[in-house]
Amino acid sequence: MKRSRVHLFARFVAFCTLLLVMSGAGVTSSRGQPRQALFQNVHVAAAVADTFLIVGLLIWLFRAGARAWLPRVGWSTLAVLVVDAGLGALQQHGSSGPLAGTLHAWLAALLFAAVAAIALFTSSSWQREAELVRDYGWPSLRFLSSTAAFLVAVQVGFGAGFRHSAVGVMPHLLGALVVAIFIIIVGAFVTTQFPKHASLRPMAVAFMTITGIQVFLGMGAFLMRMMNTAGSLVFLTISVAHVATGSLTLAAGVMLAIEIRRSVLPRAQEAA
């Protein structure tokens, strides 16, 4: 019962963290417009509330006697939260530049992925014995999934840099093509090798599906910028949704990489 409540709270905190990311995207997507002040106030309020929620979740984990490695995940999450909150405070007072704004947005996506991972670690499926399978492909799924998560993190950084005018749009556009193809390869490897696995297949399908939505929204946002409709409500909606699915893609990639490390035995162990 206690674990179930922690898991439900972790899911709620993850949802609130995603709303925080979306409110931040609303600020950058409405820059120079009257509605920016509204999004700024919402973002600050969401940041304060989410900070208390995340700290409360971490305290709950520490007091619940979680496994030894889970508090370390909590401390890492807390470190990201502190740095991100500090950068947000600098932005609020107008004393930060494009690079600091980029790092602030990028860390927010990492923070969401970390809280989503905690929700996975506290789920009932994680408490059960893993359904172990063996990796018979090359490159290894551990390498591919970890690389995919890393590439998504880089791509989210390029997107944050573009929104904060730290980099141009081309790195983000080219990165989207490379990352999307790589994710399709990883998803195809997982679903082909383990078509009936209870957790790996759904996670791989979700990873590919969210990526497809992300690419579609990104194309829509880019075309609307090209048509000089960046100030419209439609553009704002698509842009915020694009940022949200970017964070979801990162979280899905991290969770798939975690599950692969838990459930997939390396090829080197086949003879053991």
Image (cartoon, rainbow, N blue to C red):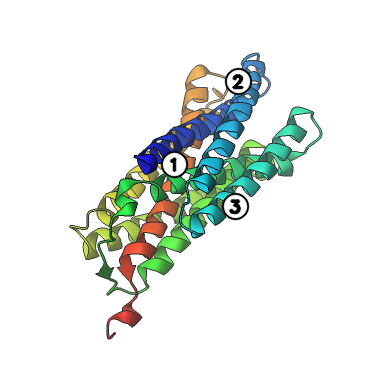
Vertical position of residue 59 compared to residue 203: above or below:
above
Camera-side residue: 140 or 64?
A: 64
For discs 3 and 1, the disc positioned in front in the rendered view: 3
> How many numbered marks, from 0 up?
3
For the point 77% across and 35% down, which residue is it? 90
Residue 238 percent coordinates (x, y): 47, 28
Given the image, on which type of amino acid does mark 2 rest? Val
* First-in-chain label (3 vs 1): 3
Residue 185 percent coordinates (x, y): 34, 60
Snapshot quadrant of residue 189:
bottom left
What numbered label is drawn on residue 264?
none
For discs 2 and 3, the disc positioned in front in the rendered view: 3
Residue, far bottom: 271
Snapshot quadrant of residue 162:
top right
Residue 48 percent coordinates (x, y): 63, 28
Horizontally, residue 134 falls left or right of residue 173, namely left
Residue identified by numbered label 2:
42
CB under 8 Å between callouts 2 and 1? no
Given the image, on which type of amino acid does mark 1 rest? Leu
Classify mark 1: residues with Cα within 10 Å, few (<14), some (14-19) or many (20+).
many
Q: CA distance from mark 2 to mark 3?
A: 26 Å
Quarter of the figure with the C terminus: bottom left
* First-in-chain label (2 vs 3): 2
Residue identified by numbered label 1:
248
Residue identified by numbered label 3:
76
Given the image, on which type of amino acid does mark 3 rest? Ser
Camera-side residue: 46 or 230?
A: 46
Vertical position of residue 20 compared to residue 114: above or below:
above
Circle 3 SS class: helix
Camera-side residue: 205 or 75?
A: 75
Circle 2 SS class: helix
For the point 52% across and 45% down, which residue is it? 63
